[in-house]
């Protein structure tokens, strides 16, 4: 627990960022229907010494969020469980609340104009720390992008810039190319 507090302290103190020993990987999009595509956002460490123990930041864009009776819950697996199969269409962090050490609890914010933000500052309890940390599920309208602006920390307080575009530009090109190939085969 003390190591996670060091990483959180580093995030809050605005420590210097290290070169990329932690990278953001975006899983291939999955069509979830209704013109929506779901992406998994991973924080991947080069080695076990760089395992992410804390994260601070936001993911913003035209995120698809499902409201419960007009109320927006904390975006975690605790609330996604209430959605049943609709959870595949909701943007949220991939942790239960008891797996996190929150400084600024995960929140969803309506930025207006169809833009939403998932944000927070929190540590990860040791049971969920891994070299390939599944951070969030981001659901976007097909062809849309979101921006992740964040820092990840390891147990000794060293920080990594973990900014990304979701989906990665290369992923957009692959999806477009697959669509063109499908159209070509039909003709």
Image (cartoon, rainbow, N blue to C red):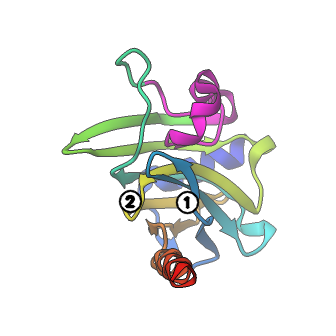
In the picture as drawn, the residue positioned furthest to the left comes out as 113
Q: Where is residue 68 in the image (x, y as percent from the top left)?
A: 44, 19
On residue 152, the disc is: 1
Q: In front of the other: label 1 or label 2?
A: 2
Quick check: 7 above or below 159? above
* Magenta residues, start to end: 73-101
On residue 80, which mark appears? none
> Does the image show residue 155?
no
Q: Is residue 104 magenta?
A: no
Q: Can residue 73 be seen in this view?
A: yes
Residue that carries the numbered disc 2 in the rendered image: 146
- The span from disc 1 to disc 2 (Cα, nearest Å) is 18 Å
Q: Which of 103 and 32 is in front in this view?
A: 32
Q: In which quarter of the image is the N terminus?
A: top right
Left or right of residue 76, residue 15 in this image: left
- Using the rendered view, name the quadrant where residue 44 is placed: bottom right
Q: Percent from the top left, x then y, of residue 14?
A: 41, 59
Q: Residue at x 48, y 49 (%)?
A: 139
């Amino acid at each position: 627990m003390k190591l996670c507090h060091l990483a959180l302290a580093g995030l809050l103190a605005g420590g210097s960022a290290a070169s990329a020993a932690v990278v953001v990987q975006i899983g291939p999009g999955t069509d979830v229907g209704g013109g929506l595509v779901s992406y998994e956002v991973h924080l991947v460490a080069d080695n076990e010494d760089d395992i992410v123990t804390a994260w601070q930041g936001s993911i913003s864009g035209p995120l698809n969020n499902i409201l419960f009776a007009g109320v927006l819950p904390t975006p975690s697996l605790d609330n996604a469980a209430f959605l049943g199969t609709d959870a595949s269409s909701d943007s949220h962090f991939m942790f239960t609340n008891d797996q996190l050490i929150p400084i600024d609890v995960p929140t969803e914010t309506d930025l207006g104009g169809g833009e939403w933000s998932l944000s927070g500052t929190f540590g990860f309890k040791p049971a969920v720390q891994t070299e390939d940390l599944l951070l969030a599920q981001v659901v976007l309208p097909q062809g849309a992008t979101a921006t992740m602006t964040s820092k990840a920390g390891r147990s000794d307080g060293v920080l990594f810039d973990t900014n990304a575009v979701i989906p990665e530009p290369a992923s957009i090109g692959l999806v477009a190319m697959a669509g063109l190939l499908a159209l070509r085969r039909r003709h």
